[in-house]
Image (cartoon, rainbow, N blue to C red):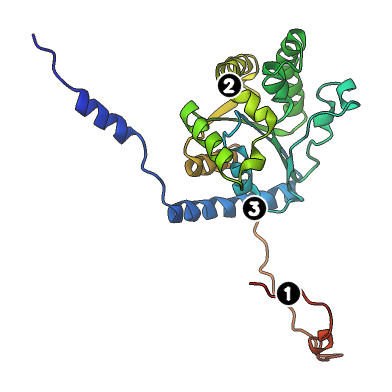
Amino acid sequence: MAKAKHAPEDKASEKSDKPEKMKGKTYLEELEKLQVRLCHLQDWAKETGARVIVVLEGRDAAGKGGFIKALTERVSPRVFRVAALPAPSEREKTQLFMQRYIQHFPAGGEIVIFDRSWYNRAGVEYVMGFCSEEEHRDFLEICPKAERWIVGSGIILIKIWLEVGMEEQDRRFHARVNDPLRQWKLSPMDVESYSRWYDYSRARDQMLAATDREESPWFILRSDDKKRARLNGIAHILSQIPYERIDRPKVELPKRSNKHKYDDQSILVGRRMVASVY
């Protein structure tokens, strides 16, 4: 019996599974709604003294920077703090591994976003040979215990892995190479890691197997589509925190006093002014 030819229909169904590209206007409208909710979360955190840690991990060019910008651009940096630690100093190398991260943990009323975290040991340090096999093995064993302590102390811990596909990462790397506005994003470490896709995949798999626990689970965020990834990621964070909207009385501005009134603009004539180039 002749085999039915379904190839064209199969291809069509594959295409239909992929959502259409989100329009910029739609993205901004949805982002604004989520950012309003983030402001409510901010008020709630300040009011209740809640402590939240958001861990963002993923391959290079997975979209962490854009996600963090969308997450924090409308909230106070005194409440939403971003911790993006550089390579450890010689002194920090002699400390307990988690020590330099703990000092950035939130106090009451703070939400700390780790742009990479202690999971560097499970990722870049392990793949690039900056830690030994024993140190990597010890980290995977101890990390769930440390996170149980973090959660047990009352901190809300949210862990998100941004998963970008190989083709999309390749496209983003080449965009960085050719765009002078993005070349600063391309560090020597990024270039070196580019060729080690499957090494990073295996390190990711080991990390998830060892540290995805009920009390501190990992959530995978597909990030090939940047706009949808940012919206989905923010919505997920909001869903993991039991915040409530804090109703505040409407602010009424007082009348400006005309006492001691004078021409406060003409007095600036003759001062050094910034040139109106634009």
- Residue 11 in sight: yes
Q: Position of residue 130 (x, y in %)?
A: 76, 18
In the image, residue 21 sits, relative to residue 187, either above or below, namely below
Look at label 2 and name its amino acid: Ser
Look at label 3 and name its amino acid: Glu
Q: Position of residue 17 (x, y in %)?
A: 33, 33
Name the quadrant containing residue 272: bottom right
Mark nearest the camera among 3 and 1 is 1
Quadrant placement of the N terminus: top left
The residue at which mark 1 appears reads as 275
Return the residue nearer the eye: 272 or 236: 272
Q: Secondary structure at mark 3?
A: loop
- Residue 217 in sight: no
In the image, residue 126 sits, relative to residue 64, either above or below, namely above
3 or 2: tag closer to the N-terminus: 3
Q: Measuring 62% from the left and 50% from the top, which residue is drawn there?
A: 38
Spatial CA span between label 3 and label 1: 28 Å
The residue at which mark 2 appears reads as 195
